[in-house]
Image (tube, helix red, strand yellow):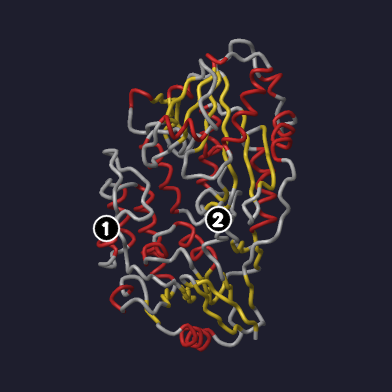
Amino acid sequence: MVSVDFKYGDSVINLQLPEENLKVIKERGFPGLENPKKKILEAIENPVGTEPLSKLLSPGDRISIIVDDVTRDTPVSMIFPLLLNKLRELGVKEHDITVVMATGAHKRQSVEDLVKRIGGTPPEGVKLLVHDPLDKSSLSLMGFTRMGTPVWVNQAVAEADFKLGIGSIRPHPEAGFSGGGKIILPGVSAWEAIGKHHMLYISSKSRTGILEGNPFREDIDEYAKIAGLDFVVNVVYNTEGEIAGIYAGDPVKAHREGVKTVRSICENKVDEKADILIMGFGPKDDTVWQIVGTAFNLSTIDSSVKEDGTVLLLASCRDGVYVPFKGVHHLNYEGVLTGTQKFVDLLKTSPSPEHVLSLTIRGEVPYPELGIKGVLLSMLRQKVKLKMVSNNLKSEDVEWFGELSWSPKEALEEALKEHGKDAKIIAMPNISGPEKRPSMKPYPYVKKH
């Protein structure tokens, strides 16, 4: 037997697991860069898949620098000053530079937030904008992707002669990995474009660690190309929160190089899906909704567990099922930061996936991504047995999606009895990822996906 400690609240739950057919998902150590600023400059001067900036820029070019927002951990305040100095060395004038904060459909942020994000007030002449996905007068429709997503982007970005994005790469539950063209979609796109795009999350290929054949990622890459994204600077962190790599250049080729590093840190290959998946969620496990309403968790379950398999969700849920507005940072179409209480109440009625999908397409949920999460949860409820292990809940708190157990040991014994001594087990002791930010979550990658 193998002893495994699963994070639960602020403590751990120890389980003894049969060693045969067991895969424990772990992050791997990876060294941080000794001189990140030097590496940033080297990456910019020696880009992947494209010419250096000195050959890409022409005198008088209008340049749009797109940076991610305050919900992300990209070291923009380190990168931006170095990039700005490089542009000035190349003869770019301050009045030709516009910095746009890519908020996507997140809570509206301020110019003051942007100033802080880029490391302080920029030189006179540099223009600062915070993207607003609902302000149609500030958006330009540039075309459509093959999947029908309208390429509807911030006008300052659309009209720029050269577009450069700053972001980071980490495992992503829908796009496979963040970074690359995500700075454009959803970053500086219309609310409607973001919503249309997120419908692609319903595909079983739109999952963590998958790039090839992933419609969510393919839509992003095509969208960014139509929008004219020329160059990216993407950062990769290790699990200690240190910068482990800088990848600059072509939005797709540089991104894919960065993905290789992320895979080496976070990816755990397994030969096939599990009969039993055990997940420890502490310390980010205050509510039931944090567990079953999070895209990373839903994607992991969907891509890692066999049909009729069992999932043990070890979570304290000390605050119950849902706390209004906790963790909510998306706007609805009216521009209001919307809680999800009504949607959670709907899911408590155990609706069919078809019903939730219909409501989502008709625009009757606060934002499309939330609706697709509900569809996926409804599908998983029919596909696998979800068992919440918590001593802070009652059966009625979870009966809308699964069962409740107060004893981790008994829950494991029941699962092993059901699936047999040869059951394949995937153990994720720390699904929330390292407590240090940014969180580089380790994940299972099933070879036969």
Q: Nearer the viewer, residue 313 or 319?
A: 319
Q: Which mark is residue 208?
A: 2
Residue visible at 65% across and 32% down? 250
Q: Which mark is residue 80?
A: none
Query: How far apart, in angstroms, are the residues tagged by discs 1 and 2?
Result: 27 Å
Residue visible at 28% across and 50% down? 365
Q: Which mark is residue 341?
A: 1
Whether the residues at callouts 1 and 2 have beta carbons within 8 Å, the answer is: no
* Residue mark closest to the camera, 1 vs 2: 1
Q: Amino acid at mark 1?
A: Gln
Helix, strand or loop at label 2? It is loop
Is residue 205 rendered to the left or right of residue 448? left
Point out residue 327 in the picture as x, y percentages from the top left corner. 38, 54
Q: Quarter of the image containing the N terminus?
A: bottom right
The extreme front residue here reads 120
Q: Nearer the viewer, residue 375 or 13?
A: 13
Residue 357 location, quadrant: bottom left
- Residue 201 drawn above or below residue 67: below
Is residue 423 rendered to the left or right of residue 136? right
Q: Amino acid at mark 2?
A: Thr
Dot 1 or dot 2: first in sequence order is 2
Q: Nearer the viewer, residue 355 or 328?
A: 328
Is residue 53 rendered to the left or right of residue 191? right
Q: Quarter of the image containing the C terminus?
A: bottom right
Q: How many C-alpha atoms fall within 10 Å of the one at disc 1: few (<14), some, or many (≥20)?
A: some
Residue 151 location, quadrant: top left
- Residue 293 drawn above or below residue 224: below
Point out residue 392 in the picture as x, y percentages from the top left corner. 36, 76
